[in-house]
Amino acid sequence: MNRFGEYNFECNLPTPLLGELHEFRDQSRFIVERMLLRKPSLRGLTARQYLSSIESYIPEEIISPQNYAEMKTLASSFTSCITSFFGFETRLNNPDASSDYLFAISSMKGEREALRDMLEKGCFPIKCMDLVVWQHIRDFTKEWTNPNSLLYNNVFGLWLEFDKAELSSPIPIPCIFLQTPLLRLDTPKDIEKFTWLTTSALPLLTDHRVSKKLEKQMKKALKHLPKGVGLMDVGVMLSRPASGVRYCLVKIKPQDIIPYLTRLGWSDTKKRFTTLIKELETKVTRVVLHITITEEGADQKIGIECSFSPNRYHLETQWATFLDYLVQKGVCLSEKKEALLSFSGVEQENEHNDFDLASYQVSAKIQNDAFSSALVRFISHIKIIYTPDAPIEAKAYCGARLLGKSSTSQEGA
């Protein structure tokens, strides 16, 4: 595949006027060569432009051309520069080449304000804003951008995740994850800090109060956390029939997972989960526990997010071994393993420099635009899904994230 489609946003013309990649495959090389003369900045792109920028690296074993086209169509609705971090979720033991699409909106760099303006000022499709779910998201975003709001300093970021079925829907409905400060309930003060979630954030997104039963279970799950463990993300599955609230718990040791779940009333009579945890402990260096809290307590379905620490993005070399383990275990197809490994890489604005991860940081944390950009493609994590009396599943999350090297860093290099 030629690389023309990666740079079509550098022509200072709207993307629809340029058309899609396939429309240019037979055009004059004169145009293509001049497009490639200038390496574009990867800053300030729309969601669709970011998708176009990595299109030639997408393995068709993971995302079919039709699936990717649906993602780009959906992304076209988000006309503002609201994200610099996005990714895909794919089932590893399913031959179907389809993935979910997700992207993050940061509280920094004006991304949340761009989302608010887009939803409030008519830049988002009217048919979507007719749906009550999107009205709730708009109301949440308005509150999130208010400096006097409880949400302003308590929500670091927001993930919109669109399931495969939603990508082709006339009005797609996302699942939403809120990134929060690390939450625990060790003292009465901690409980006060927690109330913004149950009295403001979740009611705004769901349009109903958190029931007393659910709030009790949510608090119980935090009060019983092992030492040092905290809640990092809270999810509401707006597009799914399942009720409850998703917790993503970080800094948990593998040996503490089952005792913690047992305190919440969870049980696994066949002890398969114990064996799985012991295996994973020898394969990865970082785990995040995903549980769904309902009015009855912790749901039986458990997710174990597996990765390596520290995060080395595309430079991580341990994924091949872990994927081999998953293939041997029968939860990952060989072709999907190879496709995932082929996805990783980096595009630098300044290709003359060797990529040095130590000199880059997440672009959203850089206050101004005086930096050289790099877009890294990487395997973020693999989630193992365990349900008693059901086969184990594995999902891979591959992402792309904009990093930046400030001008001062470049001068000192």
Image (cartoon, rainbow, N blue to C red):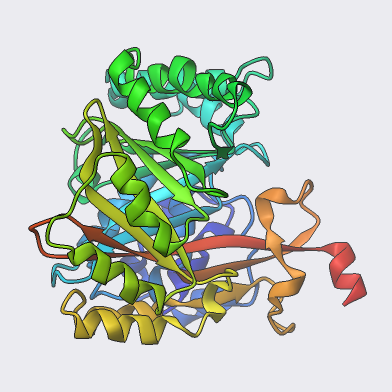
Q: Residue at x 56, y 70 (%)?
A: 309
Nearer-the-camera pick, 376 or 79: 376
Nearer-the-camera pick, 170 or 221: 221
Q: Residue at x 53, y 20 (%)?
A: 196
How many marks are shown on the rendered structure? 0
Quarter that holds the N terminus: bottom left
Q: Residue at x 78, y 46 (%)?
A: 367
Measured as percent of width and height from the top left, residue 383 is found at 32, 62
Residue sitting farthest toward the left = 389
Measured as percent of width and height from the top left, residue 363 is found at 68, 55
Residue 82 in view: no
In the image, is residue 218 above or below residue 257?
above
Measured as percent of width and height from the top left, residue 134 is found at 35, 24
Q: Quadrant location of residue 11?
A: bottom right
Q: Is residue 313 left or right of residue 253?
A: right
In the image, is residue 14 above or below residue 327?
above
Q: Residue at x 21, y 76 (%)?
A: 332
Nearer-the-camera pick, 215 or 220: 220
Q: Is residue 84 left or right of residue 90?
A: right
Q: Quadrant location of residue 319?
A: bottom left
Nearer-the-camera pick, 4 or 380: 380
Residue 151 in view: yes
Measured as percent of width and height from the top left, residue 36 is found at 57, 76
Quarter that holds the C terminus: bottom right
Q: Quadrant location of residue 304?
A: bottom left
